[in-house]
Amino acid sequence: MRYIDLRSDTVTVPSEGMRQAMYKAEVGDDVYGEDPSVRRLEELMAELSGKEAALFVTSGTQGNLVALLTHCDRGAEVILEAEAHIFFYEVGGMSAMGGLIPVRVRGERGVLQPDAVRAAIRGQNIHFPHTGLICLENTHNRAGGTVTTIEQMEAVRQVAKDFGIPIHMDGARLFNAAVALGEPLAKMSAPVDSVSICLSKGLGAPVGSVLCGSRDFIEKARKYRKMLGGGMRQAGVLAAAGIYALQHNVDRLAEDHANARLLAEGLANIPGIAIDMDSVQTNIVVCDVAGTERTATQLTTRFLEHGVRANATGEYTIRFVTHLDVTREDCQVALERIKLALNG
Ligand code: TLP
């Protein structure tokens, strides 16, 4: 039986064309700034994001941590959405490595509300830590791949501007947001000072993310990347995969979004499974399985026995993610297998 892997869009493997591009990549020592493929990727991403400069980093986690260290001094508070990936899934790096204090603000379907951000900003008081940064996450992973629109980002930008606080965006899946809204990446990045964008999720590259920002910001960030062990040498083989992904795999994200909707509609029709259909905006489907009277882990174990991989993300929540290695037919088959698993 061929497993249908819906655990994450990180599970994709490089295609033949991508492997060819990696094989042929021109390389050099990137710590000396001599890898032409890395430089090309960084220039391309700076252009696409509308920022002055970009930095190739090893992962989304490293991109976010480098950004936080670059923006903030130790002891600062960082305002982020209550279930932000930076808080939830990055091993507490912001506090362990940066001495930063997370200030969690509940958003609406993962979207930070300007009034709530304003209320979380510390005033001038000898007792208070300083608010160093506001973080957005677009799309928002734990909220189900939800999109923050340009207007919503602009509203937060206005608050940030009033207090002189920079904004970093965890844009691991910013291309998904851009495709869902039909907006260019540069417009999606304009309201923020820095953005970290993953190549190894829906875009299908094996490794890497790119941090984009002003020239000064990226120059400082390059040093933090080195400090964290992210100074790579002949990284052009990886950058070439990223360039290939940008050239071939962006527009097709719309297919993943359509497949996620198909999956969500099918799942919502299964007794005991509940889905907030308004949260299904891109390639992630989060469903509540409490009505099946089984836990998420019990169910994902049964799904696995029937050839479907999915992740339990809470006691009664399961996440499915569509990506370029699953087809529409795979999603239909997955639904049939899930129904069988539930009835067995
Ligand atoms: N998310 C992974 C897991 O860590 C949960 C996934 O399977 O979705 N920001 C966001 C919004 C992310 O979803 C992820 C990865 C990251 C950052 C971190 O990227 P990597 O895995 O490259 O460090």
Image (tube, grey):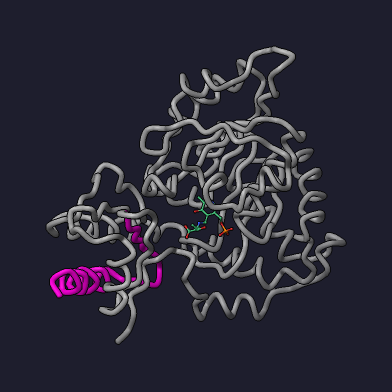
Q: Quadrant of residue 162?
A: top right
Q: Is residue 123 magenta?
A: no
Q: Position of residue 88 (x, y in %)?
A: 52, 48
Q: Is residue 19 left or right of residue 46?
A: left
- Asked if residue 285 shows in the view, the reply is no
Q: Is residue 329 magenta?
A: yes
Q: Is residue 85 left or right of residue 52?
A: left
Q: Nearer the viewer, residue 218 or 129?
A: 129
**Residue range of the region highlighted in magenta in the rendering:** 317-344
Q: Residue at x 68, y 43 (%)?
A: 95
Q: Residue at x 54, y 60 (%)?
A: 246
Q: Quadrant of residue 215?
A: top right
Q: Residue at x 50, y 26 (%)?
A: 154
Q: Residue at x 53, y 37 (%)?
A: 136
Q: Nearer the viewer, residue 148 or 40?
A: 148
Q: Residue furthest right?
A: 32
- Asked if residue 147 shows in the view, the reply is yes
Q: Nearer the viewer, residue 58 or 74?
A: 74
Which image quarter holds the C terminus?
bottom left
Up-down relation of residue 115 to residue 223 (above or below):
above
Q: Position of residue 66 (x, y in %)?
A: 71, 47
Which image quarter holds the N terminus?
bottom left
Q: Position of residue 138 (x, y in %)?
A: 47, 43
Up-down relation of residue 155 to residue 247 (above or below):
above
The mark tally for this picture is 0
Q: Position of residue 319 (x, y in %)?
A: 35, 58
